[in-house]
Image (tube, grey):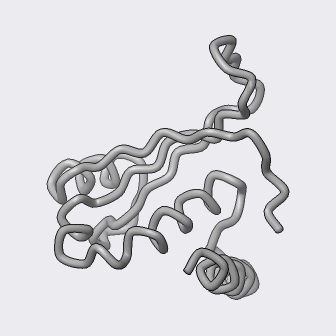
């Protein structure tokens, strides 16, 4: 479905204060951050691995403590961002949310 093979990501858990500071530094939205994704620049060399490195996903550790059942959905949301999906326009929102729902059903 996503057609990605042999890829890796870094997953970082941050408390609410640290992830909010990170979001304030890079994004203008003032909502509580639950997941942030930073894709690796195209063609950035990684000689230590033959896998495609997608980038970094930051998850809000405090949200996951309160609602651990959200972990799969938040991680998947972050991965989709690393693969180029976004939710800036209505059509993009529908596409990304539909894909997330379909993938979450397969992960259960």
Vertical placement of 48 versus 87: above or below? above
Vertical placement of 36 versus 6: above or below? below
Vertical placement of 67 versus 84: above or below? below
> Horizontal placement of 36 versus 99: left or right?
left
Q: Position of residue 13 (x, y in %)?
A: 29, 49
Residue at the extreme front: 108
For the point 70% across and 86% down, the residue is 98
> Horizontal placement of 91 versus 49: left or right?
right
For the point 79% across and 46% down, the residue is 5
- 7 or 43: nearer the eye? 7
Q: Position of residue 71 (x, y in %)?
A: 39, 69
For the point 28% across and 60% down, the residue is 60
- 20 or 73: nearer the eye? 73
Q: Quadrant of the C terminus?
A: bottom right
- 7 or 90: nearer the eye? 7
Count the labels in the image.
Answer: 0
Residue at the extreme top: 47
> Horizontal placement of 1 versus 16: left or right?
right
Q: Position of residue 42 (x, y in %)?
A: 74, 32
For the point 69% across and 12% down, the residue is 47
Q: Quadrant of the N terminus?
A: bottom right
Which image quadrant is residue 77 in?
A: bottom right
Q: Position of residue 12 (x, y in %)?
A: 35, 44
């Amino acid at each position: 479905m996503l057609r990605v093979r042999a890829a890796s990501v870094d997953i970082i858990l941050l408390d609410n204060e640290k992830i909010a500071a990170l979001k304030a530094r890079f994004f203008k939205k003032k909502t509580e951050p639950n997941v942030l994704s930073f894709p690796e620049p195209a063609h950035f060399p990684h000689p230590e691995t033959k896998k495609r490195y997608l980038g970094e996903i930051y998850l809000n550790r405090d949200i996951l403590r309160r609602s651990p059942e959200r972990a799969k959905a938040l991680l998947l949301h972050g991965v989709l961002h690393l693969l180029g999906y976004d939710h800036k326009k209505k059509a993009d929102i529908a596409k990304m949310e539909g894909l997330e729902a379909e993938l979450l059903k397969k992960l259960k």
